[in-house]
Every structure is written in structure tokens, then in C-alpha cells.
Image (tube, rainbow, N blue to C red):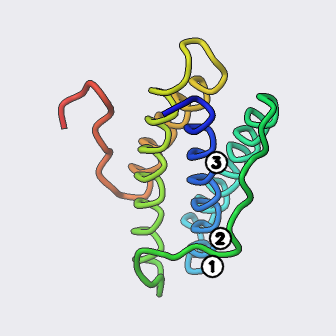
Amino acid sequence: MSDQDALQAALAAEQAIVYGYGVLGAHLSGADQQLAGASLQVHQERRDAIAALITGAGATPSPAAAAYGLPFPVTGAGTARRLAVQLETSGAGAAWDLVSAAAPGSAARGVGIEWLADAAARVQRWGGAVPALPGQPS
């Protein structure tokens, strides 16, 4: 996978994650709703940073879809938290692809490494099992 392909895939992943947080946030309250709002903001900022890297390389960022299919219906707080775990876990996969495709010391690799750490922390905050990071036992 080329650096540019990995950036476009990472952008697509972040666009889907932003959509998912928009859906799940409406089903939460209190501290969980605050966590969803903060998570949404982080993902929006990362989406924009990835789009800027794509633009900076002379390419055009792929646009977001109007809507994304969810893996299951979000009907309350429990399924909203479950979706958050799934979004963060899938984001970790896209982040790893970005890290592995990007050149050492590049801005793209830095975004991917930061994203991996952030995804692991967010999975744990949402009550999920932290996915094994590359090079670590599962």
C-alpha cells in the first residue's frame, strides 16, 4: 500500500468514525456523552489533519459519504458504548496501516502512531478490551 493510499484509507476511516460518533452521542448522557463529544472532536481534528496531509502531497482528499452503514442498530446507551469500542478498534487498524505504509519520521507516520495510542486508550475508556498492538502478544 502506498503512502497516499494509506492516507486516503485513513481519511475514509476517520470520516466513518466521525459519522458513528454523531449517531452514538445522541444515545448517551452525562459523562458518556461528554466522552463521546470529546472523542468526536479528536476524530474531526485527525480527519482534517489527514486531509491536509493529502492536499499537501498534491492529491485531493476523498469526500465523505452522505451516510455510513452501522454494524448493528444503536438503540440505547449500551449499544452506543459498544459502537464506540468498535469504531476505535477499527480506527486502530487503519492507523496501523498508515504507520506501516508511511516513511519513518514522516508526518503521516506520526499521525498513525498517535492514533494507535489514542485508539487503545479510548477502547479502554469505553469498556472494551484493548486490542493488541503490533509486536505485542494478543
Given contact means CB atoms under 8 Å apart, are the residues at marks 3 and 1 in contact?
Answer: no
Q: Which residue is mark 1?
A: 26
Query: Picture coordinates of residue 59 (x, y %)?
Result: 77, 38
Residue 27 quadrant: bottom right
Q: Amino acid at mark 1?
A: Ala
In-front residue for pair 30/59: 59
Q: Amino acid at mark 3?
A: Leu
Label 3: which secondary element? helix
In primary-sequence order, the first of circles 3 and 1 is 3
Q: Which mark is residue 11?
A: 3
Nearer the camera: disc 2 or disc 1: 2
Query: Picture coordinates of residue 62 (x, y %)?
Result: 71, 53
Hey, which residue is sitting farthest left in the picture? Answer: 137
In primary-sequence order, the first of circles 3 and 2 is 3
Q: Which mark is residue 22?
A: 2
Local packing at callout 3 (Cα closer than 10 Å; few below 14, some 14-19, many 20+) is many
Local packing at callout 2 (Cα closer than 10 Å; few below 14, some 14-19, many 20+) is some
Q: Amino acid at mark 2?
A: Gly
Q: Which mark is residue 51?
A: none
Nearer the camera: disc 3 or disc 1: 3
Q: Residue at x 44, y 35 (%)?
A: 96
Given contact means CB atoms under 8 Å apart, are the residues at marks 2 and 1 in contact?
Answer: yes
